[in-house]
Amino acid sequence: FQMSVLIETSLGDIVIDLFLKERPNCSLNFLKLCKMKYYNMCQFHYIEKDYVAQTGDPTGTGRGGESVFGMMYGEQARYFEKELIPKLRHNRRGLVSLVDSGNGMLGSQFFITLSNDGIDYLDDKHTIFGQVTEGDDTLDALNSQICDDAHSPFKDIRINHTTVIYDPFDDVKSLSYPRRSPSPTMEQLFVVNKIALDEKEEEEDGKSAAEIEEEMREKEAKAQAQILEMVGDLRHADEKPMDNVLFVCKLNEVTTDEDLEIIFSRFGKIKCCEVIKDRRTNKSLQYAFIEFETNEACEQAFFKMDNVLIDDRRIHVDFSQSVAKNFKWDKRGRNDDAGGRYRKNEADRSPRRRDRSRERRDDNRKRSRSREHGRHGEKRRREKSRDKSRR
């Protein structure tokens, strides 16, 4: 074998020597994909300690990727057959193998072994085509990553760049080889469910896998809240539902506000109880919101009233997740205008909705002015015609 490819990852560099004589098709496939920068920004989507680190899928799902032969000859050649002769065994750390994509066919995905022992059952299924000769520190860093139950690392580990050092194969004219690495897309850079590339390692120290996963969920929730604020569905990204409001569903259509208020009032004073109704038919939609005066009364009702039978229906009770009730709640008039319809203050509206409201007001003013000028203009024309007739 000969020194062939340098792979720069977010954890360090790796040099891979290819078995050019033993695996010519695999080597050709890997070299041309590296030369086309196909692997740039590919995630290490699967890492299992003392087993393998897998990458080579541009989608990051483990179900994508294609061989260079598919780009050369079309969809029917997306995958190519294994090379099993001569037989090479998975018996040491740092071996590079193309992943079996099903039915003994190979594509672009590959893995690197991370252990010297207990990996021989990979033989005859995946195809070895190279060996890591430089970059033991990078392999150690890959092997020490914290992953979830599906062996997906919490850190966003990627292949940043690939450099072909030696390529004995002729270039294929139908393929495009960029002179420089293409810039990553926004989708590749903005990943909310992974720890960012530039985030410091010290932030993970002393934290368990469950704590890191909880942090990822919080980041994703914050990102979604910011999107909702941008489109105007939330007033503030950090807005939270009220702690003293219960959501009650699976109600009978005949159950009224007064019925629920009488039943739930034994847990504490109720500030407001409303069964939500259809605007047109005024029929019950069979769910309601109940606001208590204290959080303690709300908690007691939550624990006691779930699955209780009311009007021949087993109701379901949960804490409300709606933030609309923070600024619009009482149907009887609180926070409403004189006509019973809720009217947002200018400060409560999102920037986009404020702009639209101002545009509508400006348009109405222009129309009223044009109508007024039109009436005055017609009056002036009649007066001029009268003056002419008198003369």
Image: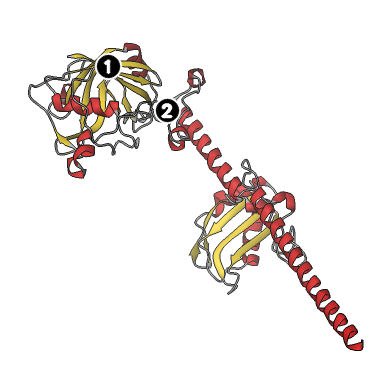
Q: Which of 217 and 90 is in front in this view?
A: 90
Image-quadrant location for residue 71: top left
| Residue at image point 62% right, 66% down | 259
| Residue at image point 66% right, 53% down | 353
Residue 360 x %, y %: 70, 61
Could you tell whether 183 is left or right of 84 in the image? Answer: right
| Residue at image point 42% right, 28% down | 154
Q: What residue type is labelled 1?
A: Ile
Task: Single out the residue that lies furthest toward the front.
Answer: 391
Could you tell whether 333 is left or right of 194 in the image? Answer: right
Q: Is mark 1 on a helix, strand or loop?
A: loop
Q: Quadrant of the C terminus?
A: bottom right
Task: Single out the residue that lies furthest toward the right.
Answer: 391
Q: Which amino acid does label 2 sit on?
A: Asp
Q: Residues within 10 Å of mark 2 (few under 14, many from 20)?
A: many
Q: Residues within 10 Å of mark 1 (few under 14, many from 20)?
A: some
Identify the residue under disc 2. Answer: 156
Image marks 2 and 1: residues in contact by CB distance under 8 Å: no
Identify the residue under disc 1. Answer: 165
Task: Single out the residue that lies furthest toward the bottom.
Answer: 389
Q: Can residue 268 be seen in this view?
A: no
Q: Nearer the viewer, residue 325 or 52?
A: 52
Q: What element carries label 2?
A: loop
Q: Is residue 331 visible?
A: yes
Check residue 206 in the rendering and tell me which mark sits there, or answer none.
none
Image-quadrant location for residue 194: top left
Q: In this view, does 369 lie above or below 171?
A: below
Marks 2 and 1, how far apart in space?
Answer: 27 Å
Could you tell whether 250 is left or right of 262 in the image? Answer: left
